[in-house]
Image: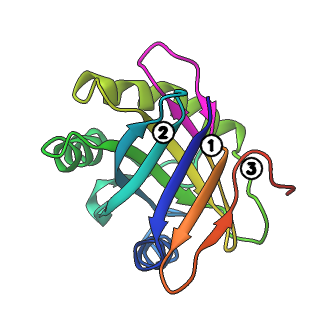
Amino acid sequence: MKIHIKITEALLARVRADLQRRHPFAFERVGFLTAGATRSPKGDILLLCRSYHIVADEHYETSATVGAQIGSDAMRQAIEVAHPGKSALLHIHTHGGRGVPTFSKTDVVSGAQFVPGFFNALPRTPHGLLVLSNTSARGLVWTAKDAKPQHVDGFTQVGRSVLKFGGCHEQA
């Protein structure tokens, strides 16, 4: 099974601009993408990004152990945004730099704790965790609450031009 994510150039620019804003005390920002999900006859998954949900400043919590920690209100609001369209929910943040980013150990551990919870409200769509660099991306997607995450095989930005980038197979 392969997993691919498509996003418009305008939506990706909006995500990058939000994630680069300074926060009063957090060291980084996070947000959520909603996406429609479809499966090919071979079982491949295509996620078509629909919208971006900004996490409000007041939903960040002070933490000495992570760059950004958000509370349950932020998670609840993201689920409420995704629920009417039965959308996939993708938690997203950036590590900056160039090339394909890597997930930190904290990203992987915390993602494995909170992403499966999205299935409680949205059980029929995959959900995931994305990390951006300034030029690429990497992703993990869960297809069910109890499933192991799968690496995203690639990303496509569509707009004035089509740009393929990121994924688990591109060299860092």
Q: Which comes before the other along the chain, label 3 or label 1?
A: 3
Q: Residue furthest front?
A: 41
Residue assigned mark 3? 102
- Camera-near label (1 vs 2) is 1
For disc 3, the neighbor class at 10 Å (few under 14, some 14 to 19, many from 20) is some
- Secondary element at image label 3: loop
Where is residue 68? Give x, y as percent: 50, 54
Circle 2 — which element?
A: strand
Give the class, few, some or many, for how many residues have Cα within 10 Å of label 2's Cα (few <14, many ≥20).
Answer: many
Of labels 1 and 2, earlier in sequence is 2
Q: In the figure, residue 32 lies in which quadrant?
A: bottom left
Name the residue nearer the viewer: 133 or 45: 45
Assign the N terminus to one quadrant of the image.
Answer: top right
Dot 1 corresponds to which residue?
A: 152
User: What range of the chain is rendered magenta?
Assistant: 140-151
Q: Position of residue 13 (x, y in %)?
A: 47, 79
Label pair 1/2, CB-CB below 8 angstroms: yes
Crowd band around label 1 with a 10 angstrom C-alpha radius: few (<14), some (14–19), many (20+): many
